[in-house]
């Protein structure tokens, strides 16, 4: 797990190249997570890079191609890794990455949260009281989880840097032109009652293409539910080879 609280942006100017690269990666992830980065020069540099990237994209409304979308429900997965990995959260919230399905075009996964049902004798909670694990800001629900996925970052002596940083706050129109470049698409989300007096919130995401090397860093934050920035790390190999048996 990344030690987010220990990142010291104040010493970036006189540090080794890999440390500066780690700070830039951390700053980019933290900004997506809704955390203010105190280094204004570094923030300005990231803003400039983002604007440059936007200018290279075609003008006008763009529709993601089929291979960037979650496959139809009828399409069988190549395999489904048996993974259900918890994030570090506050007491009373069980938030996990799971229900992973590997397709030819990408990897489907869900964020799944279970909490005690605050109103078991009433309808399912809605509005600001309900968790929103999806990528949409909904009417009457003024917040959503911050999800950031870093694909194939390098690991240096100071931590991760580089790679492709994707976030659920990105517009669906911002998908890359290069079909081999990573992209994160949002899918359906839901809330249902489950056993033992709990509510389950779940949202589906689709990462394309299938990662073939290195690591994936899944970072989340949900300050509206007292969940600070935290992450978990997976090997891409878990998506590219079928488990034995």
Image: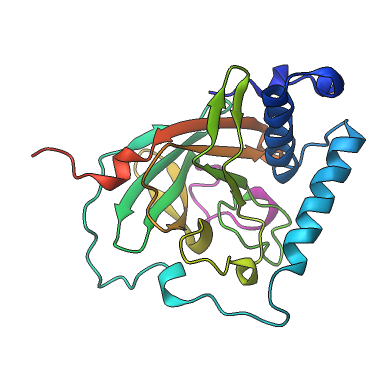
Residue, x 83% and y 50% (percent of image)? 47
Residue nearest the observer in this picture, 49 or 115: 49
Residue 33 in the image: state x and y as whole percent. 70, 41
Based on the picture, tell me whether residue 120 belongs to the magenta stretch: yes
Residue 27, x across and y down, in percent: 74, 35
Question: Horizontally, is 222 left or right of 38 in the view?
Answer: left
The quadrant where residue 54 appears: bottom right
Q: Is residue 107 above or below residue 224?
A: below
**Vertical side of 6 occupied by 96: above or below:** below
Q: Residue at x 36, y 46 (%)?
A: 212
For residue 20, say whether it is visible: yes
Q: Residue furthest left?
A: 245
* Stretch of the chain drawn in magenta: 117-129
Say whether residue 233 is left or right of residue 45.
Answer: left
- The overriding secondary structure of the stretch rendered in magenta is loop
Front residue of 208 and 45:
45
Q: Nearer the viewer, residue 112 or 150?
A: 150
The image quadrant where one finds the C terminus is top left
Give me the residue at 65% from left, 49% from top. 129
Which residue in the rendered view is the most extreme toward the bottom?
Answer: 60
In which image quadrant can residue 137 be found?
Answer: bottom right
Q: Quick check: 124 above or below 237?
A: below
Q: Quick check: 68 left or right of 74?
A: right
Q: Nearer the viewer, residue 72 or 57?
A: 57
Residue 19, quarter of the rendered image: top right
As drawn, which residue projects farthest toward the right? 40
Q: Position of residue 187 (x, y in %)?
A: 48, 64
x and y percent of residue 6 in the render?
71, 17
64 lies above or below 20? below
Q: Is residue 72 magenta?
A: no
């Amino acid at each position: 797990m990344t030690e987010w609280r220990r990142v010291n942006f104040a010493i970036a100017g006189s540090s080794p190249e890999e440390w500066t690269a780690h700070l830039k990666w951390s700053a980019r992830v933290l900004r997506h997570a809704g955390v203010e980065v105190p280094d204004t020069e570094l923030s300005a540099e990231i803003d400039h890079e983002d604007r440059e990237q936007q200018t290279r994209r075609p003008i006008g409304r763009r529709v993601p191609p089929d291979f960037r979308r979650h496959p139809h429900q009828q399409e069988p997965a190549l395999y489904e890794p048996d993974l259900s990995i918890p994030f570090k959260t506050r007491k009373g919230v069980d938030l996990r990455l799971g229900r992973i399905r590997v397709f030819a075009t990408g990897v489907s996964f869900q964020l799944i949260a279970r909490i005690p049902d605050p109103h078991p004798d009433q309808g399912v909670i809605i509005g600001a009281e309900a968790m929103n694990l999806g990528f949409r800001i909904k009417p009457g629900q003024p917040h959503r989880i911050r999800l950031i996925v870093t694909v194939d970052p390098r690991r240096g002596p100071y931590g991760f840097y580089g790679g492709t940083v994707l976030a659920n706050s990105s517009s669906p129109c911002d998908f890359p032109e290069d079909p081999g470049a990573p992209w994160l698409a949002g899918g359906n989300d839901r809330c249902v009652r489950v056993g033992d007096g709990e509510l389950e919130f779940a949202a589906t995401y689709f990462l394309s293409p299938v990662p073939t090397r290195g690591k994936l860093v899944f970072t989340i934050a949900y300050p509206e539910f007292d969940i600070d920035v935290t992450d978990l790390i997976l090997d891409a190999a878990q998506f590219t080879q079928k488990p034995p048996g």
